[in-house]
Image (spheres, helix red, strand yellow):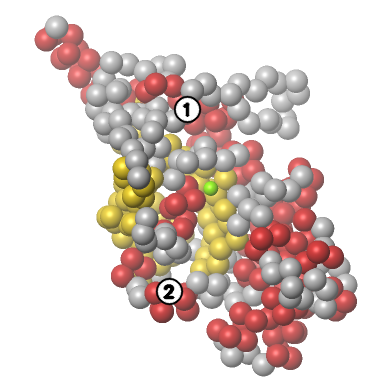
């Protein structure tokens, strides 16, 4: 499969009165054409910052990409001017956010909001733009598109508004769609419908999708691969099957235990105790040490070497590493 996006050793820092917050600390991953990659983790783990960095939407100041490259279809976005980036956003790469209400302008009709980007970026005539808008409304499952075209956001339900937002994101036929918590504000039934919609759209358009969520349950059906982030780092990544059936990192295992599963009735959900470390001065060792039931002596001293369990499955945890035992033995010898 062709690589469409390559993120390599990304570091993002925010300056605050309290000091520099190292929000993303050396994140690398690839995305292939037509693939759905999920980035999963608790709030503050750096997943949204990573996606904003791809869009070059880190507010500078206070934020800054301090290291790393982001390459989209051979173009290094970290070197692209803001003017060029403006012609990439919404056209080649689109983004949708959690709250469909704030994404839409309450004073403009749905039709205007659907067509304006196309008319501006692609110089499409208004008749052609309208035809394309109606086609997109149909694609995302809005009934009576002709009538709905003239209506305002408040005349739509939350789920329908999120469908409109998705239609707007897709109307210029982007190759990459980034969805940041796209179903969090919706109730469970609507959530499932929106996720099905993503799947269908991908089959029909071949768009690559990055889905950002705190909820592993959301990605269980639609992600091809999953990246798990913790304290600004990717601590495990693998195919959906590897993450759901052979999770290795204690944090990934904890996340899985805290997700309700439809296939197990009356199952007990176990939240992960404790909180992530503060990213003003991230620990030099494994950032999960303080919460990890398996933590060893080496864990808070040295960051684990990444272990590859397969071509697709990588994990940063000392439990996976023979060298941890050697380090422990070495420490024991010295004491
Ligand atoms: Fe737990 Fe140590 Fe693995 Fe970190 S490296 S997840 S503390 S066992
Ligand atoms: Mg977020």
**Residue drawn at (32%, 16%) of the image:** 296
Disc 1 target residue: 275
Residue situated in front as seen by the camera: 56 or 324: 56
From mark 1 to mark 2, how far is it between C-alphas?
A: 36 Å
Above or below 252: residue 96: below
User: In the image, residue 160 lies at what x, y percent?
Assistant: 78, 61
On the rendered image, what quadrant is the C terminus found in?
Answer: top left
The spot of residue 279 in percent (x, y) is 36, 37
Q: Which residue is drawn at 58% across and 24% down?
A: 271
- As helix, strand or loop, the secondary structure at mark 1 comes to loop
Q: Is residue 5 visible?
A: no
Residue underneath mark 2:
85
User: Toward the viewer: 13 or 259?
Assistant: 13
> For the view shown, which residue lies furthest in the front direction?
17
Looking at the rendered structure, the secondary structure element under dot 2 is helix
The first of marks 1 and 2 along the sequence is 2
Tell me the crowding category of disc 2: few under 14, some 14 to 19, or many 20 or more residues within 10 angstroms, Cα based: some
């Amino acid at each position: 499969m062709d690589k469409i996006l390559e993120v390599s050793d990304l570091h993002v820092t925010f300056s605050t009165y309290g000091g520099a917050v190292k929000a993303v600390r050396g994140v690398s991953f690839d995305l292939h054409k037509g693939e759905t990659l999920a980035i999963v983790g608790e709030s503050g783990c750096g997943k949204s910052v990573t996606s904003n960095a791809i869009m070059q939407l880190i507010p500078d100041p206070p934020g800054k990409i301090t290291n790393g490259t982001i390459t989209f279809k051979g173009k290094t976005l970290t070197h692209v001017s803001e003017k060029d980036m403006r012609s990439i956003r919404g056209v080649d790469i689109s983004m949708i956010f959690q709250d469909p209400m704030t994404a839409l302008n309450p004073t403009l009709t749905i039709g205007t909001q659907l067509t304006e980007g196309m008319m501006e970026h692609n110089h499409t005539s208004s008749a052609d733009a309208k035809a394309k808008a109606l086609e997109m409304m149909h694609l995302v499952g809005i009934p009576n598109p002709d009538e709905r075209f003239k209506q305002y956001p408040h005349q739509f339900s939350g789920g329908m508004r999120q469908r409109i937002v998705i239609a707007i994101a897709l109307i210029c036929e982007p190759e990459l769609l980034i969805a940041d918590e796209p179903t969090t504000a919706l109730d469970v039934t609507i959530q499932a419908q929106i996720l099905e919609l993503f799947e269908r759209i991908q089959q029909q358009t071949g768009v690559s999708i990055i889905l950002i969520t705190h909820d592993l349950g959301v990605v269980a059906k639609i992600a091809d691969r999953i990246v798990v982030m913790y304290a600004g780092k990717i601590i495990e990544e693998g195919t959906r099957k590897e993450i759901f059936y052979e999770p290795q990192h204690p944090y990934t295992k904890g996340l899985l235990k805290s997700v309700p599963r439809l296939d197990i009735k009356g199952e007990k959900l176990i939240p992960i105790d404790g909180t992530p470390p503060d990213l003003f001065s991230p620990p030099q060792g494994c950032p999960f040490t303080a919460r990890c039931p398996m933590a060893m002596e080496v864990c808070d001293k040295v960051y684990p070497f990444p272990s590859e369990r397969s071509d697709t499955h990588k994990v940063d945890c000392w439990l996976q590493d023979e060298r941890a035992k050697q380090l422990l033995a070495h420490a024991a010898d010295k004491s």
